[in-house]
Image: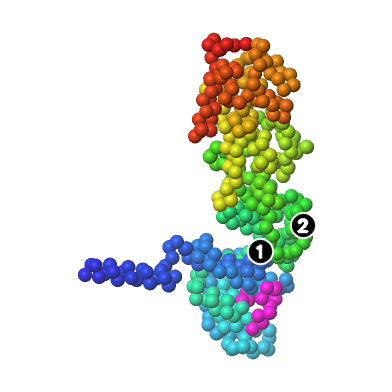
């Protein structure tokens, strides 16, 4: 008997789930109406089920804003005009309410219409009009008590799972003064994209091509040697940009940042960046050239990976500009000499220490020493860990030849 009861219960659960009666993952339905975009969106929990076009109240009789709930549902409603002397209109083709009424306030509701051409405009006395087939589709999906949230978002910033950002600016039909640069910036900040668009571009969005969605860029994740960074990078005009401040916070590098020239200097090398709201951004490939790092971009996860070789000298981190020269990891000779206290005579394309010629290689007129030559040239023992991408240098002055 218990097995039969359990089987019946299981069958009932499957039937309820398939009918949409039980949906623990989705949550209860709710309606969000954006008057500016003329859309009614049906959600179950936080999942968008369907979006419908609507007509809203005229500027002289605007639709209300705020949080409401469905208080009644009527099939084949009558229309009772507020104009003195006009007779009630029964359900039928002459009824401006159509064949469904979903009331959410004493005098306001969502309903069908016998004027489908008005959908997408500001045409009603405050109610929300829908195409007849749409309101009849919505009607069975909601119940009395379903939340109805009416907003007036004239600036819509959308962010998808890949970090792609799109901007749509709608007409401020009610003249509420919502289309401002400050409001636009706040909307960008809400999704962490405050540095994505310049003020000049914001003015263009506010003044031109209203109602049309525009892709403007992408937020991307950053990883340094496999570790995620808190800050985000940007992709704009197909260029990957990395905030310069991330180098200090994640790599401990001491950079000279010049906001006036929009550039940074590190170890005598300058690269040009782009200033965005007081944050200097650098092109990913320029940055990797500066650092001598291996870089890649994973489009699937929207992640820029920056793999740097970490260098230690006698167990302590050695901030230095690692490069691969002729396919071999190379270290700036000056950093090695400063660490050991050795002295070198450097002339154009030639380096000698205590009369011995050192097999240095030059990059941008800077002498480097390949790690395969470090021990023989400077008596510095080298251990390269390929898995950890680290170079460990060990120098014992009283054992080494010294200067």
User: Image quarter for residue 3?
Assistant: bottom left
- Mark 2 is surrounded, within 10 Å at the Cα level, by few (under 14), some (14 to 19) or many (20 or more) other residues, namely few
Looking at the image, residue 137 lies above or below residue 323: below
Identify the residue under disc 2: 204
At 71% from the left edge and 65% from the top edge, which residue is drawn? 211
> How many numbered discs, if any?
2
Observer-side mark, 2 or 1, equals 2
Residue extent of the magenta highlight: 114-130
Lower position in the chain sequence, tag 2 or tag 1: 1
Q: In x, y percent, where is residue 367?
A: 68, 24
Of the 4 image quadrants, the one containing the C terminus is: top right
| Residue 152: image tag | 1
At 59% from the left edge and 30% from the top edge, which residue is drawn? 329
At 47% from the left edge and 63% from the top edge, which residue is drawn? 26
Let me know if residue 230 appears in the view. no
Q: CA distance from mark 2 to mark 1?
A: 21 Å
Looking at the image, residue 117 lies above or below residue 330: below
In this view of the protein, which residue sits in the foreground, 330 or 173? 330
In this view of the protein, which residue sits in the foreground, 393 or 89? 393
User: Does the magenta segment cover residue 51?
Assistant: no
Q: In x, y percent, where is residue 362?
A: 69, 26
């Amino acid at each position: 008997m218990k097995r039969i009861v359990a089987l019946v219960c299981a069958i009932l659960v499957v039937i309820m789930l398939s009918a949409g009666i039980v949906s623990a993952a989705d949550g209860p339905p709710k309606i969000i109406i954006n008057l500016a975009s003329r859309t009614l969106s049906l959600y179950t929990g936080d999942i968008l089920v369907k979006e419908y076009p609507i007509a809203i109240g005229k500027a002289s009789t605007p639709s209300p804003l705020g949080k409401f709930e469905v208080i009644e549902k009527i099939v084949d409603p009558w229309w009772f005009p507020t104009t003195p002397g006009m007779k009630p209109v029964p359900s039928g083709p002459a009824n401006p309410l159509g064949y469904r009424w979903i009331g959410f306030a004493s005098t306001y509701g969502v309903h069908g219409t016998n004027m489908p051409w008005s959908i997408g405009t500001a045409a009603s006395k405050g109610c929300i009009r829908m195409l007849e087939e749409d309101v009849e589709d919505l009607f069975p999906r909601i119940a009395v008590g379903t939340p109805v949230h009416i907003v007036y978002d004239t600036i819509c910033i959308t962010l998808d799972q890949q970090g792609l950002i799109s901007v749509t600016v709608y007409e401020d039909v009610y003249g509420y003064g919502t289309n401002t640069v400050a409001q636009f910036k706040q909307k960008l900040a809400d999704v962490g994209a405050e540095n994505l668009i310049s003020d000049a571009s914001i003015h263009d969005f506010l003044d031109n091509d209203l109602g049309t969605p525009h892709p403007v860029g992408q937020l991307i994740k950053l990883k340094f040697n496999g570790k995620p960074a808190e800050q985000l990078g940007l992709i704009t005009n197909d260029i990957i940009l990395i905030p310069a401040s991330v180098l200090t916070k994640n790599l401990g590098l001491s950079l000279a940042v010049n906001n006036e020239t929009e550039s940074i200097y590190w170890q005598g090398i300058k690269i040009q960046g782009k200033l965005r709201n007081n944050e200097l951004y650098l092109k990913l490939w320029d940055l990797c050239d500066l650092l001598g790092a291996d870089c890649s971009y994973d489009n699937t996860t929207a992640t820029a990976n920056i793999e740097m070789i970490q260098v230690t000298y006698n167990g302590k981190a050695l901030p230095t500009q690692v490069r691969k020269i002729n396919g071999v990891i190379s270290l700036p000779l000056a950093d090695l000499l400063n660490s050991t206290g050795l002295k070198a005579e450097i002339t154009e394309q030639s380096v000698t220490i205590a009369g011995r010629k050192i097999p240095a290689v030059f990059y941008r007129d800077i002498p480097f020493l390949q790690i395969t030559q470090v021990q023989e040239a400077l008596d510095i023992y080298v251990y390269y860990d390929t898995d950890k991408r680290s170079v460990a240098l060990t120098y014992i002055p009283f054992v080494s030849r010294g200067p």
